[in-house]
Amino acid sequence: MSAYMMAMMDIHDPDGYTEYREKVPAFIAKHSGRYIVRGGTADVTEGSWPTGRVVVLEFPDYGAIQAFLADPEYQPIAAIRHRTTTSHIWLIEGVPNTPSSENMHGYVLGNVRITDADAYKTYAGQVPGVIADHDGAYLARGGKCEAAEGGTDLDRMVIVGFSDIEAAYKFYKSEAYNPLLTVRTNASDSNIVLVEGL
């Protein structure tokens, strides 16, 4: 199953960061990763997210992300990022039989901390149908996740892909999703951002 690396980078040295941005794609490709989000428009619709540039990478599996981060040749490149940004990096396991993200260019990203598990089951049971009705699909949904950098406390990470950012908004603001949104917000503390993909 696919796996994802989500990064939130607050860039404090834009000139220095340019070197990182130019050098890192070769190492991502070396480990069979690819960008699905790379600094597009981001709109925090619930809660809060670390400030800065949103990047999401897709890898063939969790081990590929770990190999990328541990690659000795990548370490000097990572040092450039550490020097030029404040970063939060999260590793997220994809869903079984992860759908292709090739035609997805808009995403809903979520960090959801469930506070009422019984009530949340109602949301979890009904939302996949609403997502599918808007031609969306889960890429990640509550599987293994960990913070590789930064202090953000994770619980349930979610990535939902849509054809474009407009479709993501159409889902999020739809009449069909509205009652489920109420259920989720009452049953969890959620941090949600809608982002433009590549």
Image (tube, helix red, strand yellow):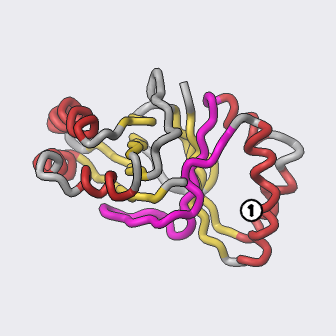
| SS at circle 1 | helix
Residue drawn at point x = 21 percent, y = 39 percent: 130
- In x, y percent, where is residue 21? 74, 62
- Residue 131's quadrant in the figure? top left
Determine which residue is flagged by label 1.
Answer: 21
- In x, y percent, where is residue 62? 62, 30
Q: Amino acid at mark 1?
A: Arg
- 168 or 127: which is nearer to us? 168
Left or right: residue 35 compared with residue 133: right
- Vertical position of residue 46 compared to residue 123: above or below: below
Residue extending farthest to the top is: 97
Residue drawn at point x = 25 percent, y = 55 percent: 170
53 in the magenta segment: yes
Residue count near mark 1 (Cα–Cα under 10 Å), binned few <14, some 14–19, many ≥20: few
- Residue 142's quadrant in the figure? top left
- Vertical position of residue 198 compared to residue 5: above or below: below
Q: How many marks?
A: 1
**Image quarter hosting the C terminus:** bottom right
Residue drawn at point x = 22 percent, y = 33 percent: 129
- Vertical position of residue 20 compared to residue 134: above or below: below
Left or right: residue 118 compared with residue 45: left
Residue 117 seen in the figure:
no
- 74 or 139: which is nearer to us? 139
- In x, y percent, where is residue 162? 38, 45
**Image quarter hosting the N terminus:** top right
Residue 58 seen in the figure:
yes
Q: What span is colored magenta in the figure?
A: 33-62
Residue drawn at point x = 36 percent, y = 36 percent: 137
101 in the magenta segment: no
Left or right: residue 57 compared with residue 138: right
- In x, y percent, where is residue 96? 46, 22
